[in-house]
Image: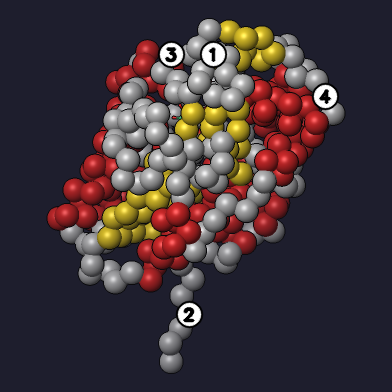
């Protein structure tokens, strides 16, 4: 008689913004979850909240990806079927001022992970890549065949890891999904988990939310002279819940793949729609009922005018499409922000 085996998924960076939402989705879908996180950019409370939301428990290992011995023990202790790999450093500006820290944490950390996976014959991986791997372009939308060319060390680490994974697949039967996120925003609808940036937010939405909440006074709007309808930057914002649904779709695909056949494929995860910075500010004011003061500042180095996805490949091959609209993204973001004005330290 066949015995149903529950699949166990290792989530690196599972206490972080996207990882914590992925843990919720995995637990609700019935997977067992093992989280590895060093809390370099997150808080243990996130994992308690994941368990509160789902009514399920997960296994947690505090540690660093570069601790090879610990990783090896983790794979000995658990029968892991696949890995969702979120654990990297992600601040673009910091990566420019301290590139070695980024290459060490992100690239070296991933090498340790892949070595240990290979040693334990676990070769199914979902990698958090980014639209930042694409060469800046004036032609939108971007599909997965668009030219690559990251422009900062953080983006280079993503591009290098993608290349490493493609090389692994050329030499052995790995099954890998490279998920290229556009601009993840929003939070779980419970308001219990969300994005909790340390210090001054780098990304637009957390900054807008903090101004609306009175945590910060004024939003810097980086440039209003772009060739866009209102002159401010345009991005493809995607609800984090839709994003993690894309991970589950990719995971299901990988779990059905023949373990003897290599598979490595990039997928854009975006909505295919662009909204400008000022549209985001106005929509946030409407949803929150708060005013968001802003000041036009010079353009930010490295920014492109507009960026949005062609996500048809994910639709066709993963049967996935982003479902939540802008109002849902902003309402969930505001619920998280207003319930947790200082993030997990509230
Ligand atoms: P996050 O910083 O909230 O989460 C990353 C988690 O990894 C944190 O909990 C951190 O403590 C942990 N971590 C980092 N280095 C580690 C290490 N060496 N060992 C163990 N744990 C480590 O970031 P996020 O926004 O949740 O992003 C998740 C992934 O998605 C990242 O790979 C990021 O590059 C990618 N991504 C994010 C965005 C975005 O805008 N948030 C966009 C595109 C891609
Ligand atoms: C969006 C728009 C800004 C902040 C970044 C990374 C990318 C990826 C996602 C990980 C732009 C404007 C922003 C502010 C502003 N991360 N802005 N005032 O730049 O598209 O992507 O996050 O992979 O690698 O580069 O997102 O949210 O920083 O900016 O006016 O305080 O908002 O100029 O037009 P971006 P963002």
Seen at 46% across and 75% down, the residue is 5
Seen at 21% across and 55% down, the residue is 169
Q: Is residue 17 visible?
A: no
Q: Which residue is mark 4?
A: 290
Mark 3 and mark 2: span between their CA atoms?
A: 53 Å
Q: Which residue is mark 1?
A: 225
Disc nearest the viewer among 1 and 4: 1
Mark 1 and mark 2: span between their CA atoms?
A: 59 Å
Mark 3 and mark 1: span between their CA atoms?
A: 14 Å
**Among the two numbered marks 1 and 2 on one chain, the one whose residue lies closer to the N terminus:** 2
Q: Which residue is mark 3?
A: 301
Q: Secondary structure at mark 4?
A: loop
Q: Is residue 301 visible?
A: yes
Residue 79's spot in the image, x, y percent?
A: 39, 64
**Marks 2,4: beta carbons within 8 A:** no
Q: Most extreme residue toward the left, as rendered?
A: 171
- The answer to whether 84 is drawn above or below residue 182 in the figure is below
Mark 2 nearby-residue class (10 Å; few <14, some 14–19, many ≥20): few
- The answer to whether 244 is drawn above or below residue 140 in the figure is below
Q: Nearer the viewer, residue 91 or 14?
A: 91
Which of the 4 image quarters holds residue 278? top right
Disc nearest the viewer among 2 and 4: 4
Disc nearest the viewer among 1 and 2: 1
Q: Is residue 117 left or right of residue 54?
A: left
Mark 1 nearby-residue class (10 Å; few <14, some 14–19, many ≥20): some
């Amino acid at each position: 008689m066949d015995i149903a085996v529950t699949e166990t998924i290792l989530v690196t960076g599972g206490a972080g913004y996207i990882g914590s939402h992925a843990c919720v989705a995995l637990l609700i879908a019935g997977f067992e979850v093992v989280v590895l996180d060093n809390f370099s950019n997150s808080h243990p409370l996130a994992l308690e909240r994941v368990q509160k939301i789902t009514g399920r428990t997960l296994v947690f290992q505090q540690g660093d990806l570069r601790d090879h011995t610990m990783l090896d023990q983790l794979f000995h202790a658990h029968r892991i079927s696949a890995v969702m790999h979120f654990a990297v450093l992600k601040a673009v500006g910091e990566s420019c001022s301290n590139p070695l820290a980024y290459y060490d944490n992100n690239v070296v950390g991933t090498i340790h992970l892949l070595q240990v996976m290979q040693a334990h014959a676990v070769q199914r991986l979902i990698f958090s890549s980014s639209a930042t791997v694409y060469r800046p372009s004036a032609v939108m939308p971007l599909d997965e065949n668009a030219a690559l060319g990251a422009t900062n060390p953080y983006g280079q680490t993503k591009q290098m890891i993608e290349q490493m994974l493609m090389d692994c697949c050329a030499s052995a039967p790995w099954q890998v999904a490279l998920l290229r996120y556009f601009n993840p925003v929003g939070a779980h609808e419970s308001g219990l988990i969300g994005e909790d940036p340390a210090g001054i937010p780098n990304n637009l939405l957390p900054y807008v939310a903090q101004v609306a909440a009175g945590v910060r006074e004024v939003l810097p709007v980086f440039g209003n002279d772009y060739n866009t309808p209102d002159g401010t930057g345009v991005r493809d914002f995607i609800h984090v819940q839709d994003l993690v649904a894309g991970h589950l779709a990719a995971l299901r695909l990988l779990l059905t793949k023949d373990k003897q056949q290599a598979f490595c494929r990039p997928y854009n995860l975006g909505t295919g729609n662009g909204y400008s910075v000022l549209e985001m500010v106005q929509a946030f004011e409407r949803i929150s009922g708060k005013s968001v003061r802003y000041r036009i500042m010079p353009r930010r180095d490295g920014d492109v005018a507009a960026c949005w996805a062609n996500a048809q490949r994910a639709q066709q091959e993963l049967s996935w499409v982003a479902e939540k609209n802008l109002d849902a993204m902003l309402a969930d973001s505001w619920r998280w922000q207003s319930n947790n004005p200082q993030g997990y330290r509230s």
